[in-house]
Amino acid sequence: MVEEGQPAPDFELESDAGETVKLSDLRGKPVVLYFYPKDDTPGCTRQACGIRDAWGEFQRAGAEVFGISADTTASHEKFKSKYSLPFALLADPEHKLGVPYGVGQEGKSSYERSTFVIDADGNVAKIMRRVNPDQHADEVLAALS
C-alpha cells in the first residue's frame, strides 16, 4: 500500500467520456485522486458537488481532479451530467486500485472514501483517509497550496 512520499502507483482507467486516463501521462501538474463509494448517494454527491463548487480554486492550483469508484462508465456519465461535474470520473469495476492505494473495504464492493494528492513529480504528497464529504474540497485545496 502506498505511503506519503512514495511514487503513486500508475494505472490506466476509463473515464466517463470513454477516454483512457493514465496517471503517468499527467506528470508536470498536481493530481487529485479521490475514491468514493457510489455514484449518486448522499455523501458522494455532497463530496462531488463540493469540488464542483470550488472548481475555480482547483483550476488556479493547476490540479487535475479525478473521482474514482467501482461504478461503470455509464453510471458515471449519468452522475456527472445530473450534477454538472467539471472533472472526470474514472471507472474501476474490477477494483484494480483497491490494493495499491489501500482503499478496498473488507467484504464490500465499494471503495473507502479516501483522497490522494499527487505532486507534479508523481509522488504522493498527501493521503486523506475516511474524509468528511462536507469538508473535503477545502481540505484538498489546503493540501494543494
Image (cartoon, rainbow, N blue to C red):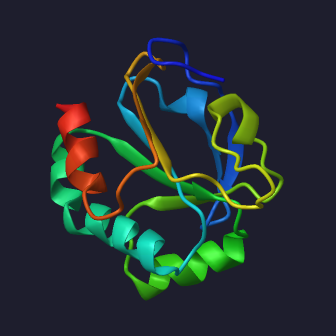
Q: Residue at x 68, y 64 (%)?
A: 18
Residue 141, horizontal then vertical, whole percent: 21, 43
Identity of the residue furthest to the bottom in this view: 82
Q: Residue at x 25, y 39 (%)?
A: 62
Q: Quadrant of the N terminus?
A: top right
Identity of the residue furthest to the top in this view: 5
Left of 41 or right of it: where is 127?
left
Front residue of this view, candidates 97 and 64: 97
Q: Residue at x 46, y 70 (%)?
A: 44
Left of 1 or right of it: where is 68?
left
Left of 48 or right of it: where is 33?
right
Residue 97 at least partly seen: no
Residue 104, horizontal then vertical, whole percent: 70, 46
Identity of the residue furthest to the front in this view: 106
Left of 52 or right of it: where is 48?
right
Residue 112, horizontal then vertical, whole percent: 58, 52
In the image, residue 124 sits, relative to residue 53, either above or below, namely above
Q: Quadrant of the C terminus?
A: top left
What is the tally of numbered marks visible in this picture? 0
In the image, residue 33 sits, relative to residue 111, either above or below, namely above
Residue 60 at least partly seen: yes
Please tell me in which quadrant of the rendered image residue 24 appears. Answer: top right
Please tell me in which quadrant of the rendered image residue 103 appears. Answer: top right
Q: Residue at x 39, y 50 (%)?
A: 131
Front residue of this view, candidates 89 and 38: 38
Residue 122, horizontal then vertical, whole percent: 48, 20
